[in-house]
């Protein structure tokens, strides 16, 4: 099992009120320069919050929500400090309640 770290907030906050796209583009560029594998994902309506252990967090987070999920705890801590109005946490996956750590509940449009 792998430990995944996340910040979770409303989609509106993460995608409209914060210049998150700029932060993520810079992070991708930095990873590419270092030939480092991408270890973070922006997920709209993350499926992991449907796991029973996340019921309390889901109830507190405005919907629809979005998460940045990463294997890198330092990156998530940095995002928490930068973004302020997010929930920070971690989970292990794959598990019986979280089979796919970066799955989304959002319907994919064709």
Image (cartoon, grey):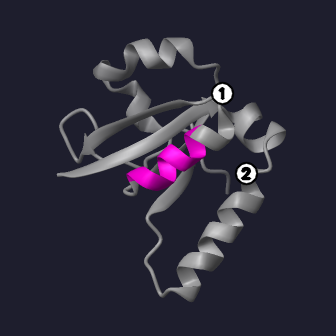
Front residue of 60 and 107? 60
* Residue 19 numbered mark, or none: none
What distance separates the C-alpha of mark 2 from that of mark 1?
13 Å
- Quarter of the image with the C terminus is bottom right
Find numbered disc 1 in the image and state the secondary structure of the residue it sits on. Answer: loop
Front residue of 50 and 8? 8
Q: Residue at x 56, y 84 (%)?
A: 32
Q: Residue at x 40, y 33 (%)?
A: 89
Q: Is residue 60 above or below residue 20?
A: above
Q: Is residue 83 above or below residue 53?
A: below
Residue 106: image location, x then y, percent:
58, 40
Look at the image and say whether residue 11 sits in the magenta stretch.
Answer: no
Q: Is residue 67 above or below residue 64?
A: below
Q: Residue at x 58, y 87 (%)?
A: 33
Q: Which residues are magenta?
A: 73-80
Residue 90: image location, x then y, percent:
35, 38
**Going from the N terminus, do you reach mark 2 or mark 1 first?**
2
Look at the image and say whether residue 74 sits in the magenta stretch.
Answer: yes
Front residue of 71 and 49? 71
Left or right? Give the position of 22 relative to 75: right
| Number of numbered discs | 2
Find numbered disc 2 in the image and state the secondary structure of the residue it sits on. Answer: helix
Q: Residue at x 48, y 19 (%)?
A: 58
The residue that mark 1 highlights is 85
Left or right? Give the position of 80 relative to 5: right
Left or right? Give the position of 28 relative to 95: right
Q: Quadrant of residue 10?
A: top right
The residue that mark 2 highlights is 20
User: Counting other residues with Cα less than 10 Å from the Cα at mark 1, is it few (<14), some (14-19), or many (20 or more)?
Assistant: some
Residue 31: image location, x then y, percent:
54, 77
Look at the magenta stretch and give its main secondary structure.
helix
Q: Is residue 23 above or below residue 87?
A: below
């Amino acid at each position: 099992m792998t430990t995944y770290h996340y910040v979770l907030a409303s989609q509106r906050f993460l995608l409209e009120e914060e210049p998150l796209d700029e932060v993520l583009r810079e992070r991708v560029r930095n990873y590419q320069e270092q030939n480092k594998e991408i270890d973070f994902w922006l997920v709209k309506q993350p499926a992991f919050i449907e796991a029973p252990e996340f019921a309390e967090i889901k109830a507190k987070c405005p919907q629809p929500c979005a998460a940045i999920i990463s294997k890198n705890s330092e990156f998530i801590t940095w995002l928490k400090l930068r973004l302020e109005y997010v929930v920070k946490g971690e989970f292990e996956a794959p598990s019986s309640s979280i089979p796919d750590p970066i799955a989304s509940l959002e319907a994919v449009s064709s």
